[in-house]
Image (tube, rainbow, N blue to C red):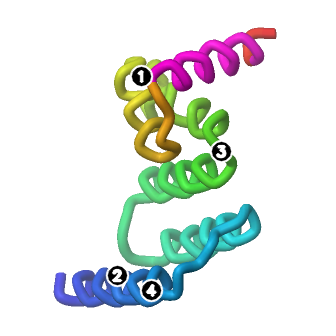
Amino acid sequence: MKSYRERQQRTANWWHDVIELGPGFGDDMLAEISRLSRMQLLGDKGLSDDHRDYLVRLKDAISEGPESLYRHVRVKPNGKRDSQHNIFRVLRYHFDLTYRECKELADRVDASDTQ
């Protein structure tokens, strides 16, 4: 547990230093953050394989944009569709979308996926 807390604190300190620099994250940087996070998550210790895989896919979906995130979160890991409320909550959190924008996005993506 002590090792875990120390690793978490090092990560938090690193992000604090990065944020202090006031970076602007473009698509290339988000892809690199995703890659580095994937490497860290796939280490020997920590989460189960299923949880690591889910988090890696979630990070990738976030970096790819709202449509990708919607496709990722609309179905739960157990294969069942999640509630619209939960899906929109995630979209609004990561992309600061309005409810109306979430609804339009969902309708557009669902329509394109059924074609």
Asked if residue 104 lies left or right of residue 5, the reply is right
Residue that lies at the very extreme toward the right in this rendered image = 115
Image quadrant occupied by the C terminus:
top right
Q: Amino acid at mark 2?
A: Ala
Tell me the mark number nearer the camera, choosing from 1 and 4: 4
Q: CA distance from mark 4 to mark 2?
A: 12 Å
Residue 80 versus residue 113: which sits nearer the camera? 113
Q: CA distance from mark 3 to mark 4?
A: 25 Å
Residue 8 versus residue 14: which sits nearer the camera? 14
Earlier-in-chain disc, 3 versus 4: 4
Q: Residue at point 57% right, 32% down?
A: 70
The residue pinned by badge 4 equals 20
Asked if residue 67 lies left or right of residue 15, the reply is right
Secondary structure beneath label 4? helix
Q: What residue span does the magenta drawing correspond to?
A: 99-112
Mark carried by residue 65: 3
Q: CA distance from mark 3 to mark 1?
A: 19 Å
Labelled pair 1, 4 in contact (Cβ < 8 Å)? no
Q: Position of residue 105 (x, y in %)?
A: 62, 23
The residue pinned by badge 2 equals 12
Q: Amino acid at mark 3?
A: Gly
Q: Position of residue 78 (x, y in %)?
A: 42, 29
The residue pinned by badge 1 equals 82
Asked if the magenta segment contains residue 7, the reply would be: no
